[in-house]
Amino acid sequence: MIPYSTQSISEDDIAAVVAVLRSPFLTQGPAVPAFEEAFAESHSVAHAVAVSNATAGLHIACLALGLGAGDWLWTVPNSFVASANCALYCGARVDFIDIDPVTRNIDLTQLAERLDRAERAGRLPKIVVPVDFAGLPVGIGILRRLADRYGFAILEDASHAVGALRDGIPVGSEGADIAVFSFHAVKTITTGEGGMCVTQNRDLAARMQLLRTHGITRDPGAMQTPPEGPWSYEQVGLGYNYRLTDVAAALGRSQLARLPEMAAARERHARRYDRMFAGTGLTCPPRYAGMTSAHHLYVVELPEDTDRASVFAAMRSAGIGVNVHYYPIHCQPYYRSLGFDWGQFPASEAYYRRCVSIPLFPALREDEQDFVVDTLMASLLRTSSVAAATI
């Protein structure tokens, strides 16, 4: 089986984990702050807060930004459900902005129009969550101008975007109030499960650090009563157990050191796919000047007359682990129970019906790529009117 994505683990990664296993600290030790410091430096941010997973990161980021009952959070349907669920965890309400059919990210023109209407109706969002889908950064400059005009916070879901750049500047370093990254096993770098919240704002970082550890502090300056001794701690708010372990942090820091080489491999594979699919009738991931995608996913859109289920089955039968990213959030049964339904966000729905994620990961070989492309084109010829292409 050629998976659509998989982790890349080196001997240095293994050695880093073994070193922690042989140390006194498997959790709440020095590896987590060391990883946070390295990530903050590599992403040009003042503060990085490691968490158990990106969903936890989105949750505490919403809380740190003050989201609560009666507030609105807007995001896109084309994402994993966590991008919307984080609002519901806080007792807030969710709405969606459709995607741009080319970028597959939030439609900024539609967002501006909706904000204008929402302002007149007194229903502006408190937070907007743009998603860097497949690793392509959103247009943060336009978003920032809209945020400043309408008074909402930007919580960038950068789960796909570790290593992505805007004009050579790392995603997460500017524009967003908080950005959240994922280190799931199939992401650009991995800790197995894990995530990172980054911000330039010291107060937001302090709130998230408190929220990830039960709302507990050991800082005498933050306690309400003088500490009785070095064992003292106080719960000063309601928080959660969203900590990252030292074992995971050691793996993450080692992976981070390898990010340039792994990002270069993803870019090389993506460009080769671009060349191989040119002129075939498939829609490939877009490219924009000044935007460097992390290429977490390589998603093709099939021609409209294609029987995707048959293509998907043929690829899986051939041992190619294709996938679909994503079933629109607003069409999930739970969200339909909240009043959403098919037909509300047509660009996301049209994209979903045609999209297929094909294998892309650093260790992918050229002969494997050739097999993926040949198998896909052969299955398309059997299920649609796509003309034969010379690969």
Image (cartoon, rainbow, N blue to C red):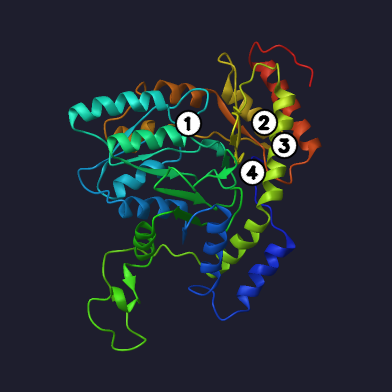
The answer to whether 176 appears left or right of 18 in the picture is left
Identify residue for label 4: 5
**Helix, strand or loop under label 1:** loop
The CA span between labels 4 and 2 is 15 Å
Q: Are marks 3 and 2 in contact (CB under 8 Å)?
A: no
The answer to whether 281 appears left or right of 124 in the picture is right
Relative depth, front residue between 347 and 372: 347
Residue 319 visible in rendering: no
Question: At label 3, which amino acid type do we have?
Answer: His
Question: At label 4, which amino acid type do we have?
Answer: Ser
Sequence-wise, the earlier of marks 3 and 1 is 1
Residue 10 visible in rendering: yes
- Residue 12 position, x and y percent, is 72, 64
Identify residue for label 3: 269
Sequence-wise, the earlier of marks 4 and 1 is 4
Q: Are marks 3 and 1 in contact (CB under 8 Å)?
A: no
> Which tag is nearer the camera, tag 3 or tag 2?
3
Sequence-wise, the earlier of marks 4 and 2 is 4
Rate crowding at label 1 as few (under 14), some (14 to 19) or many (20 or more) other CA atoms within 10 Å: many
Rate crowding at label 3 as few (under 14), some (14 to 19) or many (20 or more) other CA atoms within 10 Å: many
**Helix, strand or loop under label 2:** helix
The CA span between labels 4 and 1 is 21 Å
